[in-house]
Image (cartoon, rainbow, N blue to C red):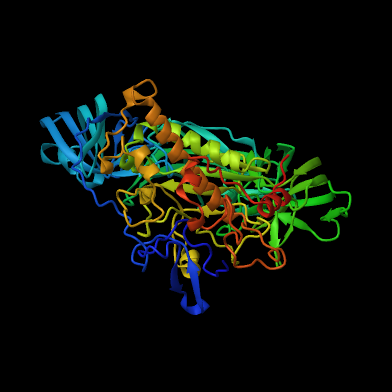
Amino acid sequence: MALKNKHLFENICVNNSAENTSSASINFGRWGGRFLLCFAMLGLSGCPEMTDPVKHEPSTRAELDMAVQYDQEVVLPTSTLSFHIRNSDRLVAESATVTLKGVHSANGEFEQRYSAQLERDGDVGDIRVELSVASKLWDDVMGGSAGSSERASFSGDIEIELGDALGVLARGGVQATRLEFVRVLEPTAEAIEVGAVFPGERVELQGGGFLRPSEGESIAYIDVGRVEYSDGTQRDITGESLALEWAGSRERAFLPVNPAVFGVQVATFTATIHLVNRLENSTEWPGSEVFDISGNLQQPYLATLAPEAGSRGQKITLTGRGMVPTNADFGYGMLLHYAGVLTPDDPALPSLEFGQSVPVVSVPDRVIDEQIAEQNVWYTIEEGRVLSGLGAVPGVFSGTITPEFFDPWGEQQGIGWQGEFRVLPTKQVVYLKYLPSFSKGLEKYGLRNVELEIRRRIMEVVTRDYDGTNVEFREDAPDDYIHYATIELGGPDPSGHNAFGYDNTFNGVAKDTGNLYLNDYLGGLNAQSAQEFNNPYGGIFLESFSFFSLELNPHNSHASEEFDRIMRPFMPALGGEVVRGTEWPQGPRSDKIAAAILMVGNVLGNTVSHEIGHSMGLPFVPGDEESPTNIFHNIEYGPYIMDPGAQRPFDERAELNGQGPAVFNEENFNYLRKYLPAD
């Protein structure tokens, strides 16, 4: 089926008439013509309503206990009290409150309740509850009889509540704690000897009164200072400032040898500094101490690469000293110059020259600190969809990588690395990113308490489907690859179409033939995909799979009695009783639970394999390598992963009654083996 409109949704569409059970006719406007499509979305002629018609009252639930971490005692007018809720990555909370109950140092008994903000450490990490002191807490504590004092304190308990539409979801707190509210916090520091340092190095200060990042900045102001270079020229740095970096304690901070002030060249510097605390509300508290610092900037160098072999897009860690990120605002940075020869593994290919006649330069992907940088085995996609760069061809690179540093006052060549680096065949790493709504979505089927087992089965299915190719699936975000694909697994389809899944990636062409782009993101909102293919959201949408229920969708010719048979014992909408944690794996319903785990895992795993296949350029048809075609599903059907949705019946997806598992047809499997050959 040749469509400009990508493969649209991984789903199936059912016409209400018994005679036509496979397609609906849609006009795609500016692409012209009419095409036969298979997808299930609300509001389109011939597609059934996919929401559950059966409603049930929510069941009562027990409040969850939370483990809360908190480490702040001194509170300023601009402080934010941050409470870390451990092991909360699967909690789907909508609101948070913080209650302080105890004794005020001046006013006696104190009990107040505050609304707080919910944040996550990353997309699926632990929850942080953050309470801005300025919103109301500061006035409650420092007002009244304490209004004229410079400090006050609270002693007692802090309780945290997380809530959702049904009420309180979880509760926890901090017991017997003390908060000191102060109006003025003066920074202090002991004198230090800087000595020999590298650009970007951090020098530790011991002292007190340093600000947390949420409160403002502790700053070192240079009253008088200069930088002197090896040729005797000098540069005045009087009036410059250095923002201290939080070191996890009010008694410690880091003074950065900031390239924006000191530069990146070999030089000596001297300065007289004093400290100031500047709050977010622009209030400043100067410290009373003034002290001198002096140091020598050393020549940076690059020492090691690790690992010593890697595939296109894989992260290589560079270690050395004096490495700095590129900062366009202040005009300094670091480049990596490659010079040498890459000898391809394929003896039929010629050797590739790097940096001998024409400079070959890359910029590190990330500078962790002045000792560690990260660089992927870099590649470039040239016009005509041709790969170039170090990672383009498997082989052995022999040569040098030399860091070059620049600032507004000149350049500095560092000491380079010399050796051999092996470029491995391309590997496609895929991150299965389970959103909190996935866990919530399992409640619809009564299976939340066996989420781990379902996820294990999904992993088994996708790993099996791509066996024999260099595709690797992971449940944790990779830290050894910079370029990797991500597919979100969530609950409802945010587009409202009740699609099963969708590849919303877009790389400027209809299909990524050759899998040139390794860092596709199947999820979230993609404006380009919305413009080109009418749907912005990607990923896997768990809640839509109730579409296969014959009882809930009696007019759906693709619905299955098998779905209802397997899910009826547990799915509330079918009158089932949810799986309890105490009945798996040893309970009387264990056989039925196991069947549900297997079925749901098979269907979801099959959908993941299909959508990831799209992102890697499947299906492959003759002509794609010259110019990617607009064909997005297999033309000849069989028990194949890349068949259109209407040609992949439920029993095949679920691997029931002797059907399935679906596989890649010969053309598609050979394509994967060509561009992602197994080690």
Which quadrant of the view contains residue 44?
Answer: bottom left
Q: Residue furthest front?
A: 19
Q: Which one is in front, 623 or 414? A: 623
Expressed as whole percent of the image width and height from the top left, the position of residue 638 reads: 59, 53
The residue sitting at 21% across, 27% down in the picture is 157
Q: Is residue 513 above or below residue 428?
A: below
Where residue 81 sits, quadrant-wise, is top left
Tell me the quadrant of the picture where the C terminus can be found: top right
Vertical arrangement, residue 323 with respect to residue 44, above or below: above
Image-based side of 50 in relation to 608, left or right: left
Which residue is nearer to you in this view: 341 or 459? 459
Residue 573, image x and y in percent? 26, 44
Residue 604 shows in the view: no
Query: What is the quadrant of the N terminus in the image?
Result: bottom right
Does residue 184 lie above or below 362 as drawn?
Answer: above
Q: Say which residue appears at 85% left-offset and 55% top-offset.
A: 353
Q: Nearer the viewer, residue 573 or 125?
A: 573
Is 557 rendered above or below residue 94? below
Q: Position of residue 330 (x, y in %)?
A: 57, 57
Q: Nearer the viewer, residue 580 or 636?
A: 636
* Residue 88 can be seen in this image: yes
Percent of width and height locating residue 626: 72, 67
Question: Does residue 31 appear to the left or right of 250 in the view shown?
Answer: right
With 432 as the anchor, is 441 left or right in this view?
left
